[in-house]
Amino acid sequence: CAVGILDVDLCGPSIPRMLCVKKTEVHQCDAGWVPVYADPKQQLAIMSIGFLLEDSNEAVIWRGPKKTALIGQFVSDVAWGELDVLLVDTPPGTSDEHLSVLENLRKHRVDGAVLVTTPQAVSTGDVRREITFCKKTALKILGIVENMSGFVCPHCSECSNIFSKGGGEELAKLTGSVFLGSVPLDPHLTATLEEGQDFLQAFPESSTYTAISQIVNTLLSSLDA
Amino acid sequence: CAVGILDVDLCGPSIPRMLCVKKTEVHQCDAGWVPVYADPKQQLAIMSIGFLLEDSNEAVIWRGPKKTALIGQFVSDVAWGELDVLLVDTPPGTSDEHLSVLENLRKHRVDGAVLVTTPQAVSTGDVRREITFCKKTALKILGIVENMSGFVCPHCSECSNIFSKGGGEELAKLTGSVFLGSVPLDPHLTATLEEGQDFLQAFPESSTYTAISQIVNTLLSSLDA
């Protein structure tokens, strides 16, 4: 299965670090920019503005039109090759990045959007506005994920709902969307993302692993349906 | 002391909910839009796009130029009155909102920016880019706050560093900025923000209260200096 990940968070590109492909140059070929591969088998292709900056601390001080132009290039001028899935990681909101991605992908088949919230109302409020965006732009909502959902203390095994509880599931019910599941707060998950390690390989026995697997399976079965 | 809060997160306005001034209409007077006051003494004036939407679930599907225009109006066409301080709450990043606020405030004296990060490298990386933005735009950095900094389990009192530790302080050292302090993860803080309660009044004995007070005092003394 060949997967592409397109990171359109131009001011805060985090995909390169999370997948541990920080220091790479992007090459050109006849078909355009060659994406950076995260694995030796070249099945996971990535494109991010993080690869285009000479210095990773450089600020991308761009207004909307410049962002729009680069996102157009990311969709059209990258030699993605034959992909089974292209995953687009957007920043929060309903603005230039989201409109540009949609416009540029219109000619392709777009399966839909996965919306990620945290449990508290301040966050579900933002995601409700993103649901409105999806409806206005006729983008199918594949489902809602609740992130940062409860923390099980490693010392005493008691669970604390640091950011409230159940907001994602409630939002899904309220808006008639599929609830894909919850990902707990887990220091191991944060640490592996920091170091670009594969969490699923490192912690296959953890409850977080089970939670993520369930989300993936629910999503995949809804795509098949 | 008269304080204004300008919320320029146009796609995710959270100030109205956090300060419990959700359902209000913005009125017009000769001097422009009348801000919404969070207190009966009218010492805390707020302006947010949240007040301008008929339905709070409405999505603000705007590209940059429209955002820029509204932010200009928020600075110039709001009857703020005599303020001692205007606090501008921006979304993350270094784009339209940040450039527009700066441009519109150029004619006023701008004290500087307080940057907020969480401890992990994915977040400090974004804030490093914001530091570059401040340097390029000659905006003074008043200091760096580390948020979501450790969680003390209410059941066993052990501390877990869910999102790594010390990234904010390290970033401050690395960039020669003032480190203002850390705010721990605290379910009481989240809950009061959800309900628009005043955390500082409700939990004056908590360690989070102490942490926030220290940050405020450090910031105020650096402003006086």
Image: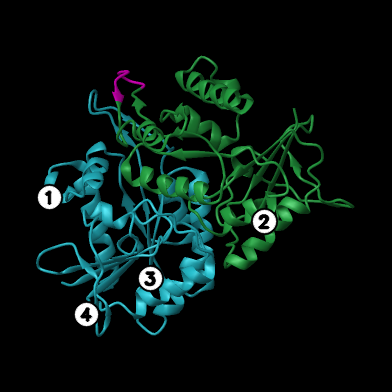
Chain colours: A cyan, B green
- At label 3, counting other C-alpha atoms closer than 10 Å, the crowd grade (few under 14, some 14-19, many 20 or more) is some
Compute the Cα span from label 4 to label 3.
Answer: 21 Å
- Taking the image as shown, residue B162 lies to the left or right of residue B39, namely left
**Which chain does tag 2 point to?**
B
Closest to the camera, between mark 1 and mark 4, is 4
Q: Specify whether disc 4 shares its chain with disc 3.
A: yes
What residue does disc 1 label?
Answer: A201
- Horizontal and vertical percent for residue A93? 50, 59
What residue does disc 2 label?
Answer: B71
Q: Which residues are magenta?
A: B154-159
What residue does disc 3 label?
Answer: A112
Compute the Cα span from label 1 to label 3.
Answer: 28 Å
Q: Is residue B157 visible?
A: yes
- Label 2 sits on a secondary structure element that is helix
Q: Is residue A110 visible?
A: no
- Horizontal and vertical percent for residue B47? 70, 47
Check residue B185 for magenta coloring: no
Amino acid type at mark 4: Gly
Residue depicted at x 81% and y 47%: B79
- Disc 2 vs disc 1: Cβ atoms closer than 8 Å? no
What residue does disc 4 label?
Answer: A81
- Label 3 sits on a secondary structure element that is loop
Ranked by sequence position, the earlier of labels 1 and 3 is 3
